[in-house]
Image (cartoon, grey):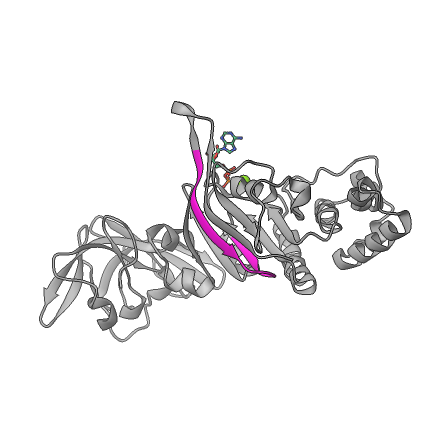
Amino acid sequence: MAKVSLRKVNKIYGSGASAVHAVQDLDLEIENGEFVALLGPSGCGKTSTLRMIVGLEAITSGDIYFGERRVSDLDPQDRNVAMAFETYALYPNFTVERNLTFPLEVRGVPEAERKRKAMQIAELLRITPILGELPGALSGGQQQRVSLGRALIREPSVFILDEVMSHLDAHLKFQMLFDLKRLHQELGRTMVYVTHDQVEALALADRVAVMSSARLQQVGDRNALYNRPANVFVADFIGEPPTNFFRAEAQANGDGLVLRTEDSDLTFALAPERAAALQGGRRVIVGLRPQNLTLSAVERPLAAEVLINEYLGERAILTLKNGATRFRALVPPDTGLKRGDPVRLGYDPRDVMIFDAETEALLG
Ligand SMILES: Nc1ncnc2c1ncn2[C@@H]1O[C@H](COP(=O)(O)OP(=O)(O)O)[C@@H](O)[C@H]1O
Ligand SMILES: [Mg+2]
C-alpha cells in the first residue's frame, strides 16, 4: 500500500504552437488507504494525471512518489498500480475466470494459486456464478465487474478507476457505487476514482479533488466543497441545481455593508464574519445556492417574478427573474406558483458566498 504524492506535476503534449498543457503544476497528496475522486469536466486533465501516476505517460516536469519512493521514471509494471478503464476490453474467447487470472498467468503464477485468487476476487465482486461464462454472454454491469476484478487480482498498492461507470444505466450505477465503496472498505487500498459526475465523486470518495482547465481548483470533503468552495468554478460545478451568481458591489449601509447587485434591484445582507473581508466599493460575485432560498422565512427581502415552475417529485425548481437577472430556488412542489406570479424569498446571510469579481476566489 502506498501514499501517492504528486509534486508540481506538469504534462505538455506536443510542442510549439500545437502544444497542449494538459496538467499544470499539480500538487496532490493521496493518503495510504484513502479513497480520492478526481472530478472535473471533460478535457480538464484527469486521464492525463492518472496515466502519469500509472506510468503510461511520461511526466513533462515535477515528480510522483509512492510513499518515500520516487516512481516518476519507473515502468508501469514496477509501480504496482492497477487501472480499470471505462471500456472493459475483456478477452472475448476467454472465460470470466481466465480473464480474471490472465495477469497472473502472464507472471507465471501457478494454476492452483490463480484459482484461489480468482475465487476470492469473484466472491468480493459477486461474480462467482459466472466464472465459466464468456464475456459475450454478460451484461454491461457484469463485464465491468470482471474488468475491475482483473485489475484487482494483482493486489495493486494503488487502484485507479477512470470513468468506469459512465455508460452504465442509473440502476447499475447505483449498485456499482455501493460495491466500490464496500470494496474500498474491505480492501483498504489507496483508490483514485476519476469522473466528471459530482454525484459519483461525492458518494464514493473521502476527499474530492476538483480540476478545471488543467489545474487543481480545490481538494476537500463534501462539506468543504459545498459550503466553502474555493472559487466560482467549484461553487458552480458542485451542487444541483447549480449555484446562483450575482455581480454586485459592497456598499455602506448604516453601520455595515450590503451587497447591491448590478443587473437587478436585489440586495444581499452580509453575515458579520464575512463583512470583515470587505470594504465599500469592492466589486464581488455573490453566490447563493437554490437550496438556500426559501419561501417560508419570516423575513423575505428578495423580490422576483416566476418564470418557470418545474416539478421534480419531492421538490420544484423555480426559475425567477429580477431586472436582467435570472436565478433559481428549490421549493416545495405544492406552491401552485405560475409564470408571472410575484414572490419574495428569504435566506440566511451565512449562506451567502462572496467571491472576488476579478480572481473569482472565495473571500472571507
Ligand atoms: N495523447 C494526447 N496528445 C495530445 N493531446 C492530448 C493527448 N491526450 C490528451 N490530450 C489533451 O489534453 C487535455 C486533457 O485531456 P485528458 O487528460 O484526457 O482530460 P479528461 O480525462 O479530464 O477528459 C485535452 O485537451 C486533450 O485533448
Ligand atoms: Mg478522461
Q: Is residue 303 above or below residue 107?
A: below
Q: In this view, does 291 lie above or below 70?
A: below
- Tell me: 121 left or right of 281: right
* Total number of numbered discs in the rendering: 0
Q: Which residue is the extreme one toward the top?
A: 17
Q: Quadrant of the C terminus?
A: bottom left
Going 24% across and 67% down the picture, which residue do you hit?
274
Going 23% across and 63% down the picture, which residue do you hit?
302
- Tell me: 328 left or right of 99: left
Task: Please state the horizontal and vertical placement of residue 170, each as a whole percent of the image.
Answer: 61, 51
Task: Please state the horizontal and vertical placement of residue 70, each as a whole percent of the image.
Answer: 56, 48
* Magenta residue check for 217: no
Q: In which quarter of the image is the N terminus?
A: bottom right
Identify the image quadrant of residue 220. Answer: bottom left
The answer to whether one can see residue 320 in this image is: no
- Tell me: 333 left or right of 82: left
Going 22% across and 72% down the picture, which residue do you hit?
272
Q: Is residue 302 above or below residue 155?
A: below
Q: Which of 183 and 56 is in front in this view?
A: 56
The answer to whether one can see residue 270 in this image is: yes
Magenta stretch: give its range: 21-37
